């Protein structure tokens, strides 16, 4: 029987509630599909920081490095300075574990979830490959004359040839593997941000190695427009860290909202991190009204990454079936109690997998 070690950081706000349901689904999947997961829970997040002044100690970080995967609920809390916990936990793992791809699937499971008129599930099925260790997130910022009327603030976006190439290559591999439109769209802003020329050139060079995959390009402003107007044109898209952050919130709305969108922060072959893309929503915390579906979809991605492909697919199908049959009315806050959604997914998983 395969055994996996995973780190679980439930985090802030609604993080613990949605993580609880996601872990129940993971447990059910273990029983049904016959593998074992050892969960190592870490208390990091704002509450822990306020109590101990500890964000993510190196000893714990070393332990996490030795795991097969990491699950994160949500991070962020208005009681502490902006970015402190985000950089200390999420960004630390993304950068120091070199999780260079942020994989964000956008898939519509039922047309009632989509705010666009006349778009059906077959029209919305794309994957955004967000470069995850560089760009505007590299932390290279500064201020001078701080607080004075002529203050200057800078933040440098960085793009290395290696960093761009590995994200682009991942996108081409993904397009082959999905075998849908077999197309990769490069989303950049090379007409204004001239440094994006490194994306233009690298994309062309990598594309030449994949003659079976079509290429496409959109400036980020136009990409936002096309994602709404013709989402069916997209298969795999690759983009910078910041643009990927932005277009994936837009993409989440196409599939039903932040209550369903999940992501994987991946370094193939190494410990990788799976999380819902939503934040900690402090105002909803502790009320059992948040949708745990995005966290459950993150478990589906985590299983797929661990090599438990069938379990991953069945978790996704269980959620999709519940939505299609409207037993799960939706993924908005307050539509179902958080725990009830966990119950439904566990039950559905058990019944659809009865003949495994
Ligand atoms: C995301 C989040 C993070 C990001 C925040 C919490 C730093 O918005 O994962 O999309 O900007 O990457
Ligand atoms: Mg974001």
Image: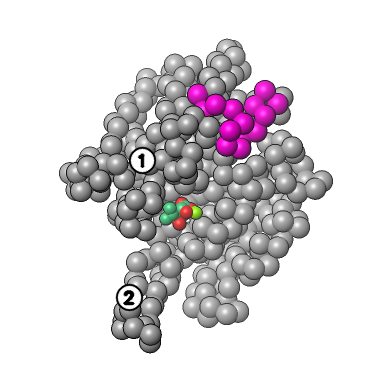
Please state which of residues 238 and 297 is positioned toward the viewer in this rendering. Answer: 297
Q: Is the CB of the residue bearing disc 2 within 8 angstroms of ligand 1?
A: no
Please state, as top left, top right, bottom left or bottom right, where the N terminus lies in the image: top left
Q: Which of the marked residues, 1 or 2, is nearer the chain's N terminus? A: 1
Q: How is the image coloured?
A: one colour
Q: Residues within 10 Å of mark 2 (few under 14, many from 20)?
A: few
**Left or right side of 228 for 157:** left
User: CA gap, disc 1 to disc 2?
Assistant: 29 Å
State whether the magenta stretch is mostly helix, strand or loop.
loop
The residue wearing badge 2 is 142
**Left or right side of 140 for 180:** right
* Whether label 1 touches label 2, CB < 8 Å: no
Q: Residue at x 59, y 58 (%)?
A: 247
Please state which of residues 211 and 99 is positioned toward the viewer in this rendering. Answer: 99
Percent position of residue 13, x then y:
41, 40
Vertical arrangement, residue 65 with respect to residue 287, above or below: below
Q: Is residue 214 magenta?
A: no
**Residue 252 circle label:** none
Q: Residue furthest bottom?
A: 150
Q: Which residues are magenta?
A: 326-339
Percent position of residue 216, x then y:
67, 64
Q: Residue at x 43, y 48 (%)?
A: 265
Q: Residue furthest right?
A: 118
Q: Residue at x 58, y 73 (%)?
A: 189
Vertical arrangement, residue 185 with respect to residue 45, above or below: below
Percent position of residue 188, x then y:
57, 69
**Residue 11 circle label:** 1
Q: Residue at x 70, y 63 (%)?
A: 225
Percent position of residue 348, x then y:
59, 19
Number of on-image labels: 2
User: Regarding mark 2 in the picture, which secondary structure is present there?
Assistant: strand
Q: Is residue 330 magenta?
A: yes
């Amino acid at each position: 029987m395969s055994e996996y070690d995973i780190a679980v950081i439930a985090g802030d706000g609604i993080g613990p509630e949605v993580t609880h349901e996601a872990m129940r689904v993971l447990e059910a999947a273990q029983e049904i599909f016959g593998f074992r997961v050892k969960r190592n829970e870490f208390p990091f997040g704002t509450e822990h920081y306020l109590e101990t002044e500890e964000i993510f100690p190196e000893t714990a970080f070393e332990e996490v490095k030795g795991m097969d995967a990491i699950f994160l609920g949500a991070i962020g809390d208005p009681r502490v300075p902006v970015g402190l916990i985000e950089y200390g936990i999420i960004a630390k793992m993304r950068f120091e574990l070199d999780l260079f791809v942020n994989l964000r699937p956008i898939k519509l499971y039922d047309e009632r979830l989509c705010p666009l008129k006349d778009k059906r599930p077959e029209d919305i099925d794309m994957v955004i490959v967000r470069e995850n260790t560089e760009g505007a997130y590299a932390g290279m910022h500064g201020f001078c004359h701080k607080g004075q009327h002529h203050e200057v603030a800078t933040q440098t976006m960085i793009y290395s040839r290696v960093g761009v190439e590995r994200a682009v290559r991942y996108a081409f591999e993904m397009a082959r593997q999905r075998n849908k439109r077999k197309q990769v769209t490069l989303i950049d802003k090379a007409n204004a941000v001239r440094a994006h020329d490194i994306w233009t050139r690298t994309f062309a060079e990598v594309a030449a190695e994949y003659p079976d995959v079509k290429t496409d390009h959109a400036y980020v402003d136009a990409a936002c427009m096309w994602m709404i107007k013709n989402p069916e044109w997209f298969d795999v898209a690759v983009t910078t860290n910041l643009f990927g952050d932005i277009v994936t919130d837009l993409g989440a709305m196409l599939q039903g909202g932040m209550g369903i969108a999940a992501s994987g922060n991946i370094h193939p072959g190494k410990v990788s991190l799976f999380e819902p893309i939503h934040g900690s929503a402090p105002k909803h915390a502790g009320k059992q009204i948040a949708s745990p579906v995005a966290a459950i979809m993150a478990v589906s991605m985590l299983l797929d990454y661990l090599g438990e492909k069938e379990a991953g697919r069945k978790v996704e199908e269980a959620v999709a079936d519940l939505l299609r049959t409207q037993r799960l009315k939706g993924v908005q806050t307050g539509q179902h109690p958080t725990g009830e959604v966990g119950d439904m997914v566990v039950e559905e998983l058990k019944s659809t997998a009865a003949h495994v």
